[in-house]
């Protein structure tokens, strides 16, 4: 489209004027064949204009790194600023960081790092799922142990009852034999 750099600068200035406390902390706004990505952190807005093909994750990673460096160098000075461009020397860092992100190897390395981080996150999620499954298995094992304990008590009670019945049956048999013997003696001997 015939939009030049000055037009994008004008759009960026208008965007800064429209941002307020109710604006989202992170946002992407399409403008022609480019996209503005911004993040607001600790009261400071960081803005970048990228081609649509540039990775959104990379853009926000750039803004995050920019924020961390800026805040570590100037965080306490921001509220005392009275002139328009007191942090102009920060441009050196911004240009260096921009080259790093534009460098194919740097982008590739950052993409690899991002992939590794996502892999670690998947592993962590998988590990949490494993722990949850172990928790379910432990819960089932606990239930089985409680059932086994209950069955063991029932078996013990039933065994005592059967032993008592067996003893009573033996006593009854002995008493019956003695009574029959006494009856036999009485009628046959006397």
Image: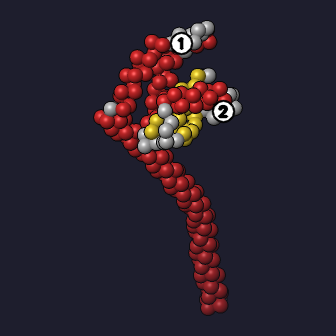
Report the front residue among 94 and 85.
85
Report which quarter residue 23 is drawn in. top right
Earlier along the polypeptide chain: callout 2 or callout 1?
2
Label 1, residues with CA under 10 Å away: few <14, some 14-19, many ≥20: few
Report the front residue among 115 and 94.
94
- Can you tell which of label 2 and label 1 is closer to the viewer? 1
Q: Position of residue 115 (x, y in %)?
A: 38, 42
Q: Element at badge 1?
A: loop
- Residue at (37%, 39%) from the top-left corner? 111
- Residue at (61%, 91%) from the top-left corner? 188
Residue 101 appears anywhere in the view:
yes
**Which residue, given by chain and number where applicable, does mark 2 sit on?**
23
Report the front residue among 147 and 82.
82
Label 2, residues with CA under 10 Å away: few <14, some 14-19, many ≥20: few
Q: Position of residue 42 (x, y in %)?
A: 60, 22
Marks 2 and 1: CB-CB under 8 Å? no
- Residue at (44%, 17%) from the top-left corner? 91
Report the front residue among 32 and 26.
32
Residue farthest to the bottom? 188
Depicted 38 relative to depicted 115: above or below: above
Mark 2 and mark 1: Cα distance apart in space: 24 Å
In which quadrant of the rendered image does the C terminus lie? bottom right
**Which residue, given by chain and number where applicable, does mark 1 sit on?**
85
């Amino acid at each position: 489209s015939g939009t030049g750099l000055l037009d994008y600068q004008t759009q960026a200035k208008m965007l800064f004027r429209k941002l307020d406390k109710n604006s989202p902390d992170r946002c992407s706004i399409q403008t022609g064949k480019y996209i503005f990505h911004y993040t607001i952190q600790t009261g400071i807005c960081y803005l970048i204009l990228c081609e649509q093909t540039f990775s959104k994750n990379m853009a926000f990673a750039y803004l995050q790194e920019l924020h961390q460096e800026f805040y570590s160098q100037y965080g306490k000075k921001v509220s005392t600023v009275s002139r328009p461009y007191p942090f102009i020397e920060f441009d050196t860092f911004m240009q260096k960081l921009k080259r790093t992100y534009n460098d194919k190897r740097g982008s590739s390395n950052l993409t690899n790092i991002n992939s590794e981080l996502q892999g670690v996150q998947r592993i962590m999620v998988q590990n949490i799922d494993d722990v949850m499954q172990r928790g379910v298995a432990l819960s089932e094992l606990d239930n089985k142990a409680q059932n086994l304990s209950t069955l063991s008590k029932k078996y013990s009670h039933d065994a005592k009852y059967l032993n008592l019945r067996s003893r009573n049956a033996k006593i009854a048999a002995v008493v019956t034999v003695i009574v029959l013997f006494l009856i036999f003696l009485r009628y046959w001997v006397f």
